[in-house]
Image (tube, grey):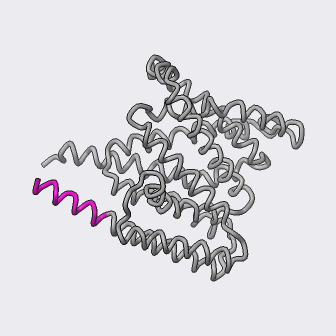
Amino acid sequence: MPPSPSAEHRTSGLVFAISAHVLWGVLTLYFIALAPTTAWEIVAWRVIFSLVFCALLLTLTRAWRPFRLLVRSPRILFTMALAGALIYVNWQTYVLATVTGHVVEAALGYFINPIVTVLLGVMVQHERLRPAQWVAVGLSAVAVVVLAVGYGAFPWIALVLAFSFGFYGLIKKRVGPSVDAISGLTLETMWLTPVAVVQLTVVGLTTGITLVGYGAWHTIALAGAGVVTAVPLLFFAAASRRLPLVYMGFVQYVTPLIQFLVGVFVLHEAMPPERWVGFGFVWVALIVLSVDMVAAARAGRRVARLA
């Protein structure tokens, strides 16, 4: 018997979701390979070439007309400006962490992100947390304290990444029905392009621009930062339309897991006992959150069947 259309839809959604998160995970190695380019120059080119790539996609898909309608909406325009500011903070912090030997702490940020998303539901959306969700939030808070006290340094990289992406996701969720992935990234990078130009100017006056002068492959790789930014985002958007939230919740752990493995086993970053303990608390929190997510989804389906 051939698979049902819904089964095929879900299978393709899983392929898109896993592809997106694997690509996000290996971006760590991609940015490290761009040496001697600094994090500030990498992010500037990432913004500019993302805008170029998105403009090309809008042209190929003949989507300029609906895009112009979005630009005429002040609410959407300025909401995407805020989203752009948040994703800029996230990109810059992540690339700085990557090229300065803090990949494991960056991975911690993306492990914490699902819990931050739950917390933002309380703070911003005024949602009520289930007991298991409160346990997960509490365990994450303990993890931060353990890492800060035991490791001797406050995990600011992890928290900046977790909260910037958490607020970014909240904004994207609110405008999601009216702003598609390509148009959203186009608007965000349009707002960020002046910042990128200023950054490139400062880099040019200090350390020097590295786009040319280090070989053709280096130039192609820097220009490709726009593609590697947009492609996983498009895969993620395709997966979101095909998969239930529970599936998306589980697959999102692929990215920080790859980052963690790269940091520990490829880059050989330090993992003293207190850091393992801190990560242990986070992983237990994620298990609690995941079990609660599955239980809530099953209960929702039972209610729907009874109705």
Q: Is residue 65 left or right of residue 80?
A: left
**Residue located at (56% from left, 40% from top):** 83
Instruction: Give the image quarter of residue 173.
Output: top left
**Viewer-nearest residue: 265 or 274:** 274
Q: Is residue 168 left or right of residue 235?
A: right
- Magenta segment's dominant SS is helix
Name the residue at the right extreme.
Answer: 206
**Residue located at (49% from left, 32% from top):** 182
Is the residue 285 above or below the residue 32 in the image? below
Residues in magenta, as a range: 294-307
Is the residue 279 above or below the residue 36 in the image? below
Name the residue at the front extreme.
Answer: 126
Name the residue at the top extreme.
Answer: 65
Residue 112: in sight, yes or no? yes
The percent position of residue 210, horizontal first and vertical second, equals 80, 39
Residue 254: in sight, yes or no? no
Q: Is residue 213 left or right of residue 294?
A: right
Is the residue 211 above or below the residue 71 in the image? below
Q: Is residue 115 left or right of residue 239?
A: right
The percent position of residue 296, horizontal first and vertical second, equals 28, 63
The percent position of residue 280, horizontal first and vertical second, equals 52, 77
304 in the magenta segment: yes
Is the residue 8 above or below the residue 48 in the image? below
The percent position of residue 3, horizontal first and vertical second, equals 19, 47
Name the residue at the bottom extreme.
Answer: 273
Instruction: Give the image quarter of residue 223.
Output: top right
169 in the magenta segment: no
Q: How many circles with numbers are drawn on the protein?
A: 0
Instruction: Give the image quarter of residue 97.
Output: bottom right
**Residue located at (66% from left, 34% from top):** 192
